[in-house]
Amino acid sequence: MAIKRIMVVDDSPTERHVLNDFLTRKGFEVIIAENGEQAIEKAKAEKPDLILMDVVMPGINGYQATRTITRDDSTRDIPVIMCTSKDLPTDRIWGMRQGALDYMVKPVNLEELLGRITQLGAANHDG
C-alpha cells in the first residue's frame, strides 16, 4: 500500500510545523495530533497510512500511545515510526517493544525520513 496520509504526533508546534511543511511539499496529506490521546482518537477516525510518533508528551506518552494503537484491532496495521530526542539503546528497544516499526532520533534527518517512508511504502506494496 502506498503511503499517502501521515499523522504527525508531537506536542512541539515547531516540530509539527517542520514535519508538516516537509511532508506536504513532498505530496503527502498530513494529519496533526498534539498528544497521545489525540493520536489514538485520530488513528481510529482517520486511518492514516503511517504515524510519526513523538515520545515525550504530557498525558499519554508516545510509548503508551504506540502500544494502544498497535494492539487495537482497528489500528494495528498502521505502521508507527517513533521520532524522539530519547536516543539511548534502551529507549529504542522499548519503543520497538511497544510496536513501533522504526525509531528515529531528533532532530530527524528529513531526507532519511523520506527514504524510510518510501521503503515502507514499497515493502507494504510488495506484501
Image: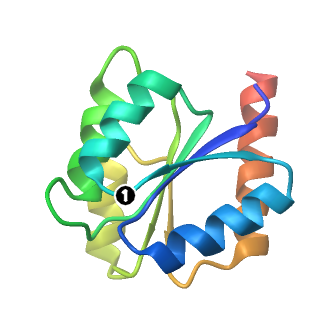
Horizontal side of residue 108 vs 74, given as left or right: right
> 66 or 94: nearer the eye?
66
Q: Quadrant of residue 22?
A: bottom right
Judging by the rendered image, the residue that carries numbered circle 1 is 34
What kind of colouring is applied to the model shown? rainbow
- The residue located at (81%, 25%) in the rendering is 126
Estimate the x, y position of residue 120 in percent, counting from the top left: 71, 43
* 118 to 78, vertically: above or below: below
Q: Quadrant of the N terminus?
A: top right
The three-letter code of the residue at mark 1 reads Glu
Horizontal side of residue 74 vs 6, given as left or right: left
- The residue located at (59%, 71%) in the rendering is 17
> 91 or 81: nearer the eye?
81
Q: Quadrant of the C terminus?
A: top right
Horizontal side of residue 45 vs 79, given as left or right: left
Q: Is residue 76 visible?
A: no
For this orientation, the residue located farthest to the left is 59
Dot 1 crowding, Cα within 10 Å, few <14, some 14–19, many 20+: some
Q: Is residue 13 visible?
A: yes
Estimate the x, y position of residue 97 in percent, counting from the top left: 29, 48
Under circle 1, the secondary element is loop
* 69 to 84, vertically: above or below: above
The mark tally for this picture is 1
- The residue located at (31%, 65%) in the rendering is 55
Q: Quadrant of residue 48?
A: top right
* 8 to 4, vertically: above or below: below
> 49 or 97: nearer the eye?
49
Q: Quadrant of residue 11?
A: bottom left
* 18 to 55, vertically: above or below: below
- The residue located at (39%, 64%) in the rendering is 54
